[in-house]
Amino acid sequence: MLFVAEIGGSMQVDAPFVVDAAELKEKRDGGKYIQLSISDKTGRGTCKVWGTPVQTVEQMEALCHAIRPGEVYRIQGYAKVYNGTCEVNVNDGIANLRAPIPPDGFDPSLFVYAPVDCEAVRQGLARVVAKIEDPGIYSLVSAVIDTTAGFLEAPAAKFHHHAYIGGLAEHTLETAEIALSLANTVSRAEMDLDVLLAGALLHDIGKASCFRRQGFSFVALPEYTLVGHTAIGAAVLLRHSAGVDPSRFAHILHIVMSHHGPHGEIQPRTPEAWAVHFADNASAFLREVLDDASDLAPGEGRQGARCGQSVYRF
């Protein structure tokens, strides 16, 4: 069996993979192709389904809508490197995408991509939460994390960073630890550490409600783009605000709403909010760079598909 991590340029591919997402794209000539995100236990990859000349736009659209994310499909095509990224191109093999492989046709353990030690992350989160001294803020953070379904299993994104089972909790722990390190490193910072930690631990809590487990993967719900995880997260916090000083709760809410920094609708206005924004970016961007560079040989470089920057391995 061929695994995602083994796919390289200029090789034939004919193996089963989980299809995590299917998106219809437009060709330069006005036609359509399907871009798939595929995975197995070794990682994630990209597949472009071009089809054959006899396939019409309507047929490509119908096929894309019929593909069931989270299911295992036979991917048959040719791998090549394009813009520094290895991707599988499917032409005649398009017929294999009409139906997934029956569950009794493969070993399920080969198709779960979960590089996170979920128990270690859970314990790490508990240690960070325990650093919060204010009883009201501690209760707020504990209640939100404990009652948010899927928080420990959901991914943090659809593709770019921590996009795997357990990724949301891992990214949350990294963000909290980086933010605390920033506050403890900058001279005379005098930040409200309880508020800082609460904001960092809850900044992406809304994402847990934006994904649904489906087959071997998680799929993004319409809320992911129609509402946005910051608004959903704010609504969750408001349901648990009793017992928290109103001024400090407003500060925590500000951190959650402004953690996207200059790219968000709400801009950070406090040192704590900026610290969480920088920590969030550091965790996300470094994960992207690490993943983009993970399969490079010494002396190799390329344009990273996730981070959007050139990456290199010495």
Image: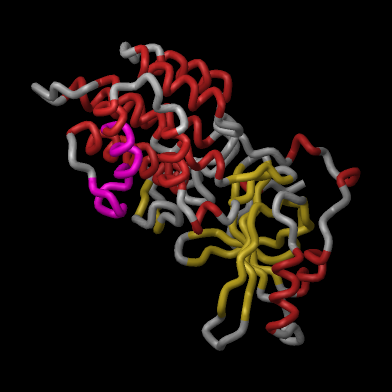
310 sits left or right of 113 in the view: left
Residue 109: percent from the left, percent from the top? Answer: 76, 35
- In the image: residue 138, left or right of residue 222: left
Residues in magenta? 251-267
Residue 102 spot, x, y in % from top left:
88, 50
> Which residue shows up at 74% across the image and 62% down it?
67
Q: Give the overall secondary structure of the magenta segment.
A: helix
Q: Is residue 245 above or below residue 215?
A: above
**Residue 10 in view here:** no
Q: Is residue 35 above or below residue 175?
A: below
Q: Quadrant of the C terminus?
A: top left
Instruction: Specify the quadrant of the image occupied by residue 180.
Output: top left
Q: Is residue 299 magenta?
A: no
Q: Is residue 245 or residue 252 the one in the foreground?
A: 245
Left or right position of 156 against 272: right
Q: Residue at x 61, y 65 (%)?
A: 23
